Image (cartoon, rainbow, N blue to C red):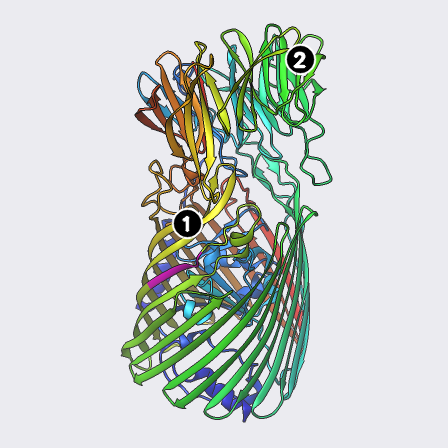
């Protein structure tokens, strides 16, 4: 009974193909409820990363995975070092990041470091491109990243062991155990990742570019994730997840420098969800705690804690109408090396998805946030999808969206001593996008899909730190106009016993600075620093029985390292390839994979003077029951 | 059949489209000579290693940015504290964290001759005979108090190479000059003026200073000490024999740079904070050393980082860092502060050397 109700919610009113379905699936496959992102974001672009990709990149960070597979660009300050995401030409602080529905961006820094997120710790990753302040709250100006655990009932015992060894002293281990029956499910996983990162690179700061071994770049990380769920009754479910992650890193210095800095990051995330559903409506209560503790050079400590309490009421009065109303309260405690601060935030939000006719589906989202008594600009968004063509085998959809977004100034921006500016107002954005989505199924069960999206965005009151004599201080002075194009083509095709899969992604992102610091500033109309105009990525995979082989290429266009675009960081191309084989011996399943990253041994830097490794290898073995 | 070909074809040609070629950068052999006009120090942004030298050819009007990298093909990776020219060499003083160095280049071709490494926080250099003297703050203390208790003057060959000696001096040696056969260095935190014999490398005499010294200058064959004391600007003429000082005090607050024309006129760069510290305005103030007349502000802007004087052409060069978001600008003005032209230079221009 519970299964059927949950699934009605899951699939009601528009999945990504704009088609209303009410399939019911077997009770065994019912999952702990996680709202599909697309449910209230009809017509917007969501990239879901495949679970196999997460397994292939086990032992590496989510930053590495996104850089190689998503068409998005990350600013990586070296191998295993800080990796910040930029979506649609916006800054690192313009991507909202969620773990099981909890916002996890640091309230002091206003962003997340993707190099700290190991792929074994999460089961599902989805990237929602574009402004979505109404849906998710602060920071979702360029887009948002959603990390989820997935827990399934009725799976019995499940054990999985993974071991990876790679170049530069890479050693990754993980172990997970889970058990679930009809009423409850539990899963625990532990991981440990280590890398010496003593890779070779050509030192561009010395005559002759001598080959040098990277020093002071060692990374050591371990963590534990625990998920639990109970079906309390036919109508209610309680679930919780805890994640503790600790990373000890030496900070890779600039080329030519022998600086020996270190950083320790300890992170705790804990969420509790209670869901209650009847036929036409349901309530979700969420409790969360996100704690970040960072120690720089062993003597400078920064700690923040966020506490969340939210409740949502959702109802489905008709088959084609679904709506929810929610409120979220956040309490933030910051104990930073130069200041202390607390903050309280309240958000009221509502989302509605309506399908007035078979071909048209749209979502309306509204949100009003309040922080420390200040109102954030009202944030609405409207998006829709219209079926131009729909048959059993093909569809062509036309998507459009307009949305507002905002970013609450970070604690550091407001209170850092010296320089913090408590008078800052929220950054804000408005974006428009439109695009087409095409998919076709072939008779032999192959399929192809293609999508293209054009977007345009204005971001205002963007905060940047400027020097005031010897003191730096932030101000809401930057305005940027962004526009771009995102295209993708993918598909799979069976060729006898061979199954071919492929994907191409192209992103063109223009981000034009509209600000001049003074009359001599040559930055007006120029591309923002470290925002490539072009990024292309493709991969091709072939599977045959137990074997799988893949090859992929990523091209990142040139980036400018200053606002006036007078100097350039070279474009680069990376090739990756790998082969893997699976075994099955009674109940035991195993796989062995060999991967080669940067196959062509390209000397490249993502950020100026931050060396990156040449060709490197990794072997992964996994066994599961 | 047709469908298979279409899909495979799509993937087959892709690898050829996106193969990028990169080749190792090669030094560009150039026959230009750079020991004319002026050199501009672009400090660079903190922790970015993008400091570089620019050259301005006053006859042709040509500006060469990234001069070191253009000539040598190697990234300087520096935070440049100072540029000095002695004899045949120009010296670039780089205090880039973990990679501090002094690079000696041929002043005409700008090709590197050698470098002194293993430094901590070098600030300035001077040359006497065949020796190079580098004033270095030394490392920060280990208790996290941000003091520099181990400052020193390093000694090396004038063409670079390994350090041969280290002379301990008081904390934070800011400025070092060679004057009438001796080396003089002033320490900002230690508040001392120290005189060193370049032959024996011994400290010959020391004098405690009342104020925090900014810079030692040589003007009109005299040794001048420039300090700021509270709201005042001090110009002291130092007697090289006994280190006594003849004081001149000027009521010019918040000054950060001083240039002298050797004929009694001086210019200084000052900074004034707004009431709520939300911005700083900088002024170029012109005044007479003899004390006649009143100091006059002749140029005003934000984000000014340095000033220089072209004595031959009688022009002021004023460096504007444009808020450090992008590259900087040098404004060329006449001695009354009227703008003549502008130059597009590198990241955070702050110092000048005129040939």
Numbered disc in front, either 2 or 1: 2
- The Cα atoms of the two marked residues, 2 and 1, are separated by 52 Å
10 Å neighbourhood of mark 2: few (<14), some, or many (≥20)? many
> Residue A113: image x %, image y %?
56, 56
On the same chain, marks 2 and 1? The answer is no
Circle 2 marks a residue in which chain? B
Q: Would you place residue A608 above or below residue B350 in this image?
A: below
Q: Identify which residue is drawn at 58% across, 48% down.
A: A417
Outermost residue on the front side: it is B293
Instruction: Residue B195: give its label.
Output: 2
Please report the bounds of the magenta region as a residue range: A425-431
Q: Which residue is mark 1?
A: A531
> Residue A144: image x %, image y %?
46, 64
Is residue A428 on the magenta stretch? yes
Residue A208 appears anywhere in the view: no
Judge by depth and name the residue closer to the eye, A605 or A603: A605
> Residue A104: image x %, image y %?
56, 64
User: Tag 2's secondary structure?
Assistant: strand
């Amino acid at each position: 009974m519970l299964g059927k109700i949950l699934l009605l919610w899951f699939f009601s009113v528009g999945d990504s193909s704009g088609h209303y379905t009410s399939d019911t699936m077997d009770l065994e496959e019912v999952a702990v409820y996680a709202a599909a992102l697309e449910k209230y974001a009809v017509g917007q672009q969501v990239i879901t990363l495949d679970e196999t990709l997460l397994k292939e990149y086990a032992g590496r960070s989510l930053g590495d995975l996104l850089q190689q597979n998503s068409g998005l660009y990350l600013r990586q300050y070296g191998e295993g070092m800080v990796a910040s995401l930029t979506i649609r030409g916006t800054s690192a602080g313009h991507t909202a990041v969620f773990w099981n529905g909890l916002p996890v961006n640091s309230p002091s820094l206003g962003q997340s470091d993707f190099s700290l997120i190991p792929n074994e710790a999460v089961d599902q990753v989805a990237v929602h491109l574009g402004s979505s302040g109404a849906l998710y709250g602060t920071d979702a100006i360029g887009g948002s990243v959603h990390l989820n655990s997935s827990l399934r009932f009725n799976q019995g015992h499940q054990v999985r062991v993974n071991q990876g060894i790679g170049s530069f002293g890479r050693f990754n281990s993980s172990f997970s155990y889970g058990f679930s029956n009809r009423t409850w499910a539990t899963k625990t996983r532990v991981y440990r990742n280590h890398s010496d990162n003593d890779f070779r690179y050509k030192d561009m700061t010395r005559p002759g570019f001598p080959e040098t071994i990277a020093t002071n770049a060692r990374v050591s990380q371990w963590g534990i994730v625990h998920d639990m769920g109970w079906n309390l009754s036919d109508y209610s479910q309680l679930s919780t997840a805890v994640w503790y992650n600790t990373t000890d890193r030496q900070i890779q210095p600039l080329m030519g420098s022998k600086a020996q800095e270190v950083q320790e990051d300890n992170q705790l995330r804990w969420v509790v969800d209670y869901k209650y559903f009847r036929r036409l409506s349901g309530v979700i209560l969420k409790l969360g705690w996100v704690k970040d503790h960072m120690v720089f050079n062993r003597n400078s400590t920064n700690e923040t804690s966020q506490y969340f309490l939210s409740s949502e009421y959702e109802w489905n009065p008709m088959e084609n109408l679904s709506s929810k109303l929610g409120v979220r309260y956040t309490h933030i405690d910051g104990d930073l090396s130069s200041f202390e601060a607390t903050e309280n935030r309240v958000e009221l939000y509502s989302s509605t998805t309506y399908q007035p006719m078979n071909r048209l589906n749209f979502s309306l989202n509204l949100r009003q946030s309040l922080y420390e008594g200040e109102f954030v600009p009202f944030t609405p968004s409207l998006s829709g999808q219209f079926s131009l063509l729909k048959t059993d085998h093909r569809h062509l959809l036309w998507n459009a969206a307009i949305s507002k977004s905002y970013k609450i100034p970070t604690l550091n921006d407001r209170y850092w001593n010296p320089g913090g500016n408590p008078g800052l107002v929220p950054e804000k954005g408005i974006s428009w996008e439109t695009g087409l989505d095409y998919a076709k199924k072939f008779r032999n069960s192959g399929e192809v899909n293609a999508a293209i999206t054009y977007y345009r965005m204005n971001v205002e009151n963007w905060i940047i730190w400027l020097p005031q004599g010897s003191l730096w201080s932030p101000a809401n002075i930057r305005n940027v106009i962004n526009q771009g194009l995102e295209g993708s083509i993918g598909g799979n095709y069976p060729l006898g016993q061979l199954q071919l899969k492929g994907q191409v992604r192209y992103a063109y992102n223009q981000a034009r600075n509209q600000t001049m610091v003074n009359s001599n500033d040559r930055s007006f109309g120029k591309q923002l620093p470290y925002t490539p105009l072009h990024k292309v990525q493709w991969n091709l995979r072939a599977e045959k029985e137990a074997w799988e082989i893949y090859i992929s290429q990523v091209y990142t266009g040139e980036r400018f390292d200053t606002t006036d675009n007078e100097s350039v960081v070279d474009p680069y191309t990376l090739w990756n390839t790998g082969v893997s084989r699976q075994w099955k011996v009674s109940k035991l399943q195993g796989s062995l994979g060999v991967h080669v990253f940067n196959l062509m041994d390209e000397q490249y830097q993502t950020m100026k003077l931050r060396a990156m490794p040449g060709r490197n290898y990794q072997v992964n073995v996994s066994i599961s029951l | 059949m047709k469908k298979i070909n279409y899909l495979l074809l799509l993937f087959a040609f892709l690898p050829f489209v996106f193969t990028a070629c990169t080749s190792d950068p090669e030094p560009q052999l150039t026959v230009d000579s750079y020991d004319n006009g002026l050199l501009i120090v672009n400090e660079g942004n903190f922790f970015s290693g993008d400091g570089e030298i620019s050259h301005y050819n006053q006859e042709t009007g040509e500006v060469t940015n990234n001069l070191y990298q253009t000539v040598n093909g190697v990234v300087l990776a520096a935070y440049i504290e100072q540029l000095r020219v002695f004899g045949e060499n120009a010296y670039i003083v780089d205090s880039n964290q973990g990679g501090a160095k002094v690079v000696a280049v041929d002043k005409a071709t700008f090709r590197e001759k050698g470098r002194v490494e293993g430094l901590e926080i070098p600030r300035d250099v001077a040359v006497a005979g065949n020796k190079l003297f580098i004033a270095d703050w030394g490392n920060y203390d280990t208790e996290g108090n941000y003091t520099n208790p181990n400052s020193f003057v390093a000694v090396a060959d004038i063409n670079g190479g390994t350090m041969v000696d280290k002379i301990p001096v008081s904390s934070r040696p800011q400025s070092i000059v060679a004057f009438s056969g001796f080396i003089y260095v002033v320490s900002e935190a230690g508040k001392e003026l120290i005189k060193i014999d370049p032959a024996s490398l011994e400290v010959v005499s020391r004098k405690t200073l009342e104020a925090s010294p900014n810079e030692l200058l040589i003007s009109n064959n005299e040794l001048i000490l420039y300090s700021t004391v509270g709201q005042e600007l001090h110009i002291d003429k130092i007697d090289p024999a006994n280190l006594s000082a003849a004081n001149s005090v000027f009521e010019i607050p918040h000054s950060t740079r001083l240039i002298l024309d050797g004929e009694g006129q001086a210019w200084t760069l000052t900074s004034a904070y707004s009431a709520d510290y939300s911005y700083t305005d900088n002024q170029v103030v012109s005044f007479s050393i003899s004390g006649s007349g009143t100091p006059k502000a002749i140029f005003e802007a934000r984000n000014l980082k340095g000033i220089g004087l072209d004595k031959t052409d009688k022009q002021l060069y004023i460096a504007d860092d444009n808020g450090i978001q992008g590259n900087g600008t040098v404004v060329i003005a006449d001695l009354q502060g009227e703008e003549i032209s502008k130059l597009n230079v590198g990241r955070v221009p702050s110092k000048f050397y005129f040939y």
